[in-house]
Amino acid sequence: MDTRDTSELPELLSQSSKPGIPAPGAREKDALSSTAAARTLISIIRPCYGPHGRQKLLVTAKGETVCTGYALAILRALELEHPAAWLLREAAQTQAESRGDGTAFVVLLAGALLEQAELLLRAGLPRAQLREAYAAATAEVVATLPSLVIGSLGPLEDPFWALNSVMNTHALFQTDFLTKLVSQACWTIRELDGNFNPERLGVCTLRGATLEDSCLLPGLAVAGKPCGQVTMVLRGARIALFTCPFGPASTNAPATACFSSPDDLTKFSKEKEQLAEKQIAQLTAMNINVVVVWGEIEEKTLIEAEKFSIMVIQAKSRKEMAYLSEVLGTPLLSYLIPPLVPGKCQRVYTQELGESLAVVFEWDHASAPALTLVLRGATTDGLRSLEQAVYHGIDAYFQLCQDPRLLPGAGATEMALAKMLSDKGSQLEGAGGLAFLAFAQALRSLPEALAENAGLTVTNVMTEMYRAHQEGNFLIGVGQEGIINVAKEQVWDTLMAKARGLQVVADVVLQLVTVDEVILAKKSPSQQQDLNSESKKAKKSPFLVRKKTIF
């Protein structure tokens, strides 16, 4: 086998017998302008890759501090200026939205391919030939994936063993307990014909207690508390959602009420009560008997609502309000007026979970949420990490219901594909062979990242993996203490996620290899004026701290 390394591409290219390729350095100016942006993204995402990846502290625009190792959350927090960085982030988001996992895989592999492409371009390979060769290599890789399948999830099989590997990458602790909970939830709502609708499984986080106190509740559960004496509606709930105070509207601007006599004060209070009565009467006229509010709840308005047996619930976050709006099919209202189309469910009641409360919405029809996984934990960041791991497990099960085939994990699939490309590249002459070798080198960077994040000696691990794969053992991957047999350790990747990730990487890389420079459009006069004003403010504030910018 040809063991040529792509770091010697200029010398190899100069020795190529393929006609039409200029001498090394003849087109050095054609280096990729997007490589620098890709390297910066790689340096940020690479430490978070794999089950031993590190966490990062993100400071949001609101000043909140978030601890996360989720690649997509980190990418969303970055302030990007280079168009190539925008495209890479968009590709990662596409992968997350379509398959739920593989965000870091897309960024790292795309960045590695762009770095290899830069070497080929500096060596003198025309962009058209590079694009064609990369497309051919991608087709070979995607076509080879099914031959690497080593297992599949049976239609009546407990999905625990298949989901444990996926969730272990995202959960920091007690992975087995969490995987059992997710497996039970997915198996419970799976339909008899084998179909699985992830929309029927909700996730609710309640701070307090420990992970062992997590449980499954029927219907859709959200964090919130009922206000007043009405704590349940057991039949025919009609629901309105409000993102405003529950009571007469108050001005946001500071104001002072001036009264000339006690009668004016009495009149003002009476009109306020009449307004509250009118608002509740409007809700009653539309048969609204459940109100969910994200805002303050005025006591007099609450008392008036209780007269008509209206259950008033105070939500804890706007995120839960948005989720309820989507599930119930009713809008979020910023004024206390009844919705034209109220949300409907069979019953609404309160569920006590230790010292916390959850409000449960239940339906009887098949398309509605049937089950909610309630996660408990001590910290908000810990709950956020657990929630992400649960969603990854749900997405993985959804993919396995569509295609139950599993690939070797822990970098074994990438090494097997790299071997295949190296073998074919060594038999091809000219640009095609070199591009195949470059693609293989980019694939090897992924198990290298796993070994590096596990604290292993990368050279030794990669040498052992290379030797094992050369001998035909494509089940060897990277573990916590060295190389492992992924079949024995049950470390898997879903075929659908891996195939989709490779296609997304190919799309963005084939687009970027044709870009030779970035052109900035002329700013409009108003934009230039805003830019000048910002520059003056920055000069006046020497301690101004800006978010990390990639260009």
Image (cartoon, rainbow, N blue to C red):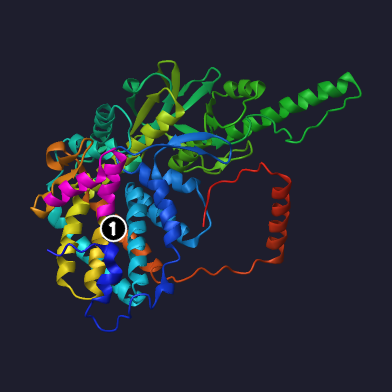
Q: Residues within 10 Å of mark 1 (few under 14, many from 20)?
A: many
State the residue at coordinates (70%, 54%).
535
Span shown in magenta: 444-467
Residue that sits furthest to the left in the current view: 471
Seen from the viewer's position, the closer of residues 246 and 270 is 246
Residue that carries the numbered disc 1 in the rendered image: 442
Q: Position of residue 197 (x, y in %)?
A: 30, 44
Q: Position of residue 184 (x, y in %)?
A: 24, 31
Q: Is residue 186 left or right of residue 537?
A: left
Seen from the viewer's position, the closer of residues 286 and 1 is 1
Q: Is residue 170 visible?
A: yes
State the residue at coordinates (19%, 51%).
413
* Main secondary structure type of the part rendered in magenta: helix
355 versus 472 height, above or below: above
**Dot 1 amino acid type:** Ala
Residue that sits furthest to the front in the current view: 11
Helix, strand or loop under label 1: helix
Q: Is residue 310 magenta?
A: no
Q: Quadrant of residue 280?
A: top right
